[in-house]
Image: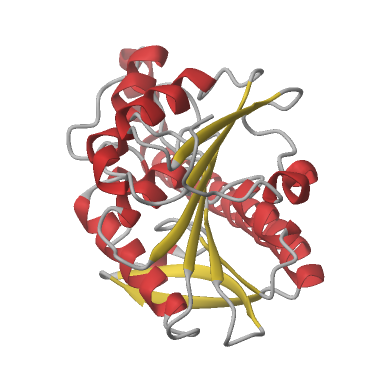
Amino acid sequence: MARLDRNGMGRMGRTGRALRARLCVAVMGLASLLSGCASLDRDAHAESLAKPAGLQREVLVAGGFRLTAFSRITRADKPVRIYIEGDGLAWISRTEPSLDPTPVVATGLALAAADPSPNVAYLARPCQFTPMQDNPRCEVAYWTGKRFAPEVLDAMDGAIGQLAARVPGQALELVGYSGGGAIAVLVAARRHDVATLRTVAGNLDVEYVNRWHRVSPMPASRNPIDVARQVAGIPQIHFSSAQDTVVPPEVARRFASAVGGTCVKTRVVSGVTHDGDWAQRWRDLLTQTPACGDRQ
């Protein structure tokens, strides 16, 4: 086929090459347009979740990244609960990474929107919801093999610090969905102001999950189970689903065992998949308050 193409181009000459060039430009333009439309659709979806909940969009700069956030801070005398998004559209297939990790369905944002607390904030992961041209540090590695790298944690920690500073002296509560659960744990291990920790379908043992799916390890990323003992004093609940085949309940159980003590609890729900409608159940699940005591 390659030889036929070369011979064909030789016969077509300059006119053929010009036509091919114009066709390539048109195809590239269409691909760019489709990508732009997809991003707009994902932005519109995010806005449709955030606006009814009074969550205002903003961009926080931390660690060299521009991070998209949505927040509603109405009481300076109350804790702030910060939700961290999952990995988003990191891969198109098992072997092909996405060019834009913005989630198609922003489950972390949906959880934040379902939270009636006076102070709620949502933090997207690096390169999600933020135009690539405005975020020069973005590269594919930051939503594939380096998604939990030290520089990513620096950026997320810095942005969380900015949000927490809006209610000085108040408790900071972290909630992470899927890969956002890994970020929540890794950041909590760095800080001294995290009062509670919740994860939903959280990837709390990256190496175990990668082995489970028979995908490549991520040596440039940190693994939350390695810092389990460092968060042992934080009251925490880790929710998982019996129907989750992406991050099965065994992941939370392994993490809880590594944490030890009486401040960590796991809860398994039924009837929701990994990327299912967790938000519909979230208000009821929020009534389960993390606390240290008899382990269950």
Q: Quadrant of residue 71?
A: bottom right
Q: Quadrant of the C terminus?
A: top right
Location of the N terminus by quadrant is top left
The reply to whether residue 117 is in sight is yes
Question: In the rendered picture of this protein, how many numbered marks are placed on residues?
Answer: 0
The front one of 7 and 128 is 128
Query: Which of the pair 280/172 is nearer the observer?
Result: 172
In the rendered view, tell whether residue 198 sits above or below residue 66: above
The quadrant in which residue 118 appears is: bottom right
Residue 11 placement, left or right of 270? left
**Residue 238 x/y as whole percent:** 52, 37
Vertical placement of 20 versus 81: above or below? above
Question: Residue 227: percent from the left, percent from the top?
Answer: 24, 41
- The x, y position of residue 79, in whole percent, is 55, 73
Residue located 35% across and 29% down the image: 205
**Front residue (pair 52, 251):** 251
Residue at the outermost front position: 294
Residue at 72 percent of width and 27 percent of height = 272
Relative to 42, 134 lies left or right: left
Quick one: which residue is furthest to the left in this view?
219
Q: Quadrant of residue 58?
A: bottom right
Which residue is rendered at x = 33% and y = 20% of the image?
Answer: 208
Q: Position of residue 125 (x, y in %)?
A: 44, 56
Judging depth in this view, the residue of 230 and 36 nearest the camera is 230
Q: Colour mode? A: secondary structure
Q: Is residue 139 visible?
A: no
